[in-house]
Amino acid sequence: MRWLVLLSGLAALGLACAFLWWPGGDGPGRSCVLPDADIGGFVQVPGGGFVKGADAIYPEEGGPIKLHVSPFLLSVTEVTNDQFAAFVAATGYVTEAERNGGSAGFVETDTPSDLLSWWKLDKGATWRTPAGAGSDIAGLGRHPVVHVSLTDARAYAAWGGGRLPNEIEWEYAASLGLFDPDDPESGLRGPNGEIRANTWNGVFPVLNTAEDGFAGTAPVGCYRANLIGAHDMIGNVWEWTETPFGDGSPQFTIKGGSYLCGSNYCRRYRTAARESLEPDFSTAHTGFRIVKDPA
């Protein structure tokens, strides 16, 4: 029953987007701009002020508020399958999806008008088997790890000598990285049509043209870095933060949108956008990146 409630919540909160390909399924493809050797690096985010919640659209994004943020280091990319595999090999860690019987996945449905029907608890879905039993991550080492809970992300971050960002840090870094501070969607596409992120292309939920090169997750670093040198803060997969979604909320905030966010539905590929997820819940389009405090 609890899983049904959580999956219903995904639909109600705009996370239930139609999906006809398994995570990692490619469209026409594109060359990734970030060298393999640079995965695992960090960029310096200087301290400063910004307006959180600027250009908000949805009520949960709140009103604009001026804040000051201390400097920190931000991982250049989302944590990849290869990186998470190294953590598991070193520690023997077992994720919550592996211990508790699966994770939320997407399925093709005969009732596309029922958004909930696109989601199911897949007992075989884990970070190792992102499309369910029988799948694996062969050839997906550079893709962001998914089917990881907040607990799993925290464990990796601690092993990696860092921590998860809070929502303010995440939004501040993403805002500094915007190509045009006056255009909240400039992380998605440039004025000349340049595609800058992996999101839903076409008409949701009936058609994904994969114009951006991928129908599922994309390898990290396939799109140009933002202005602070970080990749994929917009789109690809949602990213965990350490911030509860609201006062007293048992859910935590995720940021950045995913490959399932489209212009005619969701639109959570903006720096101010936010969503909620249970800390012990995981999905096929949620991952994370880590931060470190200056020495």
Image (cartoon, helix red, strand yellow):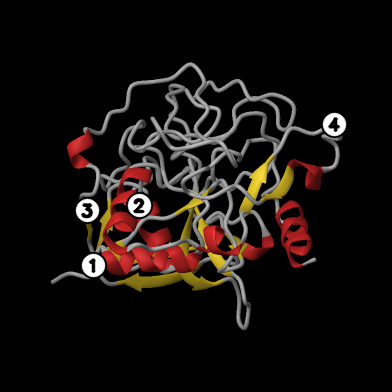
- Along the viewing direction, whichever of 217 and 42 lies nearer the viewer: 217
Q: Tell me the quadrant of the picture where the N terminus can be found.
A: bottom right
Q: CA distance from mark 3 to mark 4?
A: 44 Å
Vertical placement of residue 110 versus 106, above or below: above
- Along the viewing direction, whichever of 107 and 102 lies nearer the viewer: 102
The mark nearer the N terminus, 3 or 4, is 3
Image location of residue 200, percent across then percent down: 59, 32
The mark nearer the N terminus, 2 or 1, is 2
Three-letter amino acid code of the residue under disc 4: Asp
Q: Could you tell me which secondary element the residue under label 1 belongs to?
A: loop
The mark nearer the N terminus, 4 or 1, is 4
Label 4 close to label 1 by CB (< 8 Å): no
Q: Which mark is residue 84?
A: 2
Three-letter amino acid code of the residue under disc 2: Phe
According to the image, label 4 marks what residue? 110
Q: Could you tell me which secondary element the residue under label 3 belongs to?
A: strand
Left or right of 72 in this view: 221: right
According to the image, label 3 marks what residue? 42
Image location of residue 54, percent across then percent down: 51, 58
Three-letter amino acid code of the residue under disc 3: Phe
- Along the viewing direction, whichever of 263 and 212 lies nearer the viewer: 212
